[in-house]
Amino acid sequence: MEETIRIVGIDPGLRRTGWGIVDSLGSSLRFVAAGTVASDAKCELASRLCQLHDGLEKILHEFVPGEAAVENTFVNKDAGATLKLGQARGIALLVPARAGLKVAEYAPNTVKKAVIGVGHGNKEQIKLMVKMLLPRAEWDSDDAADALAIAICHAHHRGSMSARIAAGLARAS
């Protein structure tokens, strides 16, 4: 008998980190919540990272997910911006890991392929498909919609991930 697993998807960003939570039972998905944790751009980097940490920790405490998924960082032309995004992503990985959750990571193209069927697409396509897959979903930013897409992607891939983990554990025994 399958059991419902609550998944939090996290779209890391220094200004805004989106989060989205779905319940997954087999191939069925149910929207739980979504939102954005923002940091104050007037503060120094360390304080902004603390704001993201505390906001994500509050979300995990409130909704108690069983698994987490975080989008991989892509490298852009601005090395400084990429580094700051990487630091925000570190918080997005740390908070669920410290809460004892397994944390999966997905490339942006993998998320898009899982949600819209192709590896390249725009924000509007993602929002449209998230709304189709989760008709009751509501979000406050594109980042939160992306986070829901990350959670959906994980729901679709988690079976194969569990099988890989189980196979690895079986070999280690």
Image (tube, rainbow, N blue to C red):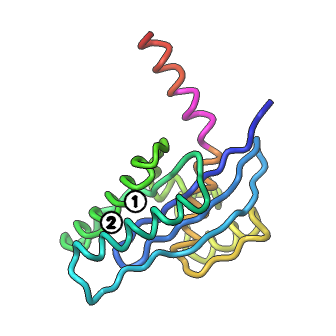
- State the residue at coordinates (38%, 53%): 93
Crowding at dot 1, Cα within 10 Å, few <14 / some 14-19 / many 20+, comes out as many
Image position, residue 20 (x, y; %)? 59, 64
Q: Are marks 2 and 1 in contact (CB under 8 Å)?
A: yes
User: Is 98 on the left or on the right of 76, as rendered?
Assistant: right
As drawn, the label of residue 121 is: none
Relative depth, front residue between 164 and 117: 164
For mark 1, what is the residue? 92
Can I make out residue 113 in this image? Answer: no
Q: Quadrant of the N terminus?
A: top right
Q: Is residue 173 above or below residue 19?
A: above
Point 40% across, 59% down: residue: 92
Quadrant of the snapshot with the C terminus = top left
Between 55 and 162, the one nearer to me in the picture: 55
Question: Which residue is the site of mark 2?
Answer: 88
- Where disc 2 sits, the SS reads helix
Q: Give the amino acid type for the residue marked by disc 2 in the picture.
A: Ala
Residue range (magenta): 157-164
Image-quadrant location for residue 89: bottom left
